[in-house]
Image (spheres, rainbow, N blue to C red):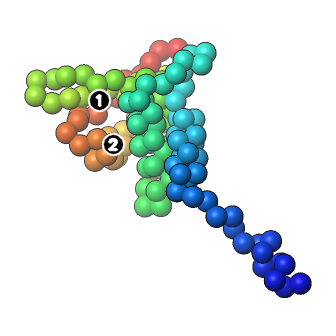
């Protein structure tokens, strides 16, 4: 009977591929697009980076990131570097402004050789 109980309480084994798929689904919730428009690969990458920062145990801005979503992301060539422009819906802009210094620092670590710029998108 104890062996049967032990089998019931064991956590299910999850493959690395399933974990990656779950991470992409959760990161996809960070993108707010109009009426089912497909996100670009860059937008998915930014959403995944935001999600990674949110779930990292050492992050001091994880509570603030919970409500933040993006609506657009684009690369912009500036002189000899690339700028990553991230558009946020206006309703989350106040939360973004509270943590922008720390969030920019984290995103610039993840997207090396890119400047990160935040823009509010009017709705």
- Please say whether residue 34 is visible from this viewpoint: yes
Location of residue 70 with respect to 105 vertically, above or below: above
Q: How crowded is mark 1: few (under 14 residues within 10 Å), some or many (20 or more)?
A: many
Residue at (41%, 43%) from the top-left corner? 49
The image's mark for residue 107 is: 2
70 to the left or right of 6: left
Residue at (34%, 23%) from the top-left corner? 74
Q: Which residue lies furthest to the left in this view?
A: 80
The quadrant of the rendering that contains the N terminus is bottom right
- 15, 105: nearer the viewer: 15
Q: How many labels does the image show?
A: 2
Residue 44 image position (x, y, % from top left): 45, 33
Residue 119 image position (x, y, % from top left): 37, 23
Callout 1: SS:
strand
Location of residue 89 with respect to 52 vertically, above or below: above
The image's mark for residue 51 is: none
- 38, 16: nearer the viewer: 16
Tell me, yes or no, whether the two marked residues, 1 and 2, touch with CB atoms within 8 Å: yes
Residue at (19%, 39%) from the top-left corner? 113
Instruction: Give the spatial CA distance, label 1 vs label 2.
Output: 10 Å
Callout 2: SS:
helix
Location of residue 123 with respect to 113 vertically, above or below: above
Residue at (69%, 67%) from the top-left corner? 11
- Please say whether residue 101 is visible from this viewpoint: no
Find disc 1 in the rendering and name its residue: 84
């Amino acid at each position: 009977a104890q062996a049967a109980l032990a089998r019931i309480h064991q956590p299910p084994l999850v493959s690395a591929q399933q974990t990656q798929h779950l991470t992409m689904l959760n990161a996809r919730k960070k993108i707010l697009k109009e009426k089912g428009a497909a996100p670009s690969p860059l937008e998915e990458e930014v959403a995944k980076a935001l999600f990674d920062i949110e779930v990292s145990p050492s992050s001091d801005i994880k509570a603030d990131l919970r409500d933040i979503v993006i609506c657009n992301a684009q690369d912009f060539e500036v002189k000899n570097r690339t700028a990553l422009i991230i558009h946020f819906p206006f309703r989350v802009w106040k939360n973004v402004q509270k943590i922008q210094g720390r969030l920019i620092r984290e995103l610039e670590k993840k997207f090396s050789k890119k400047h990160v710029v935040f823009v509010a998108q009017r709705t």
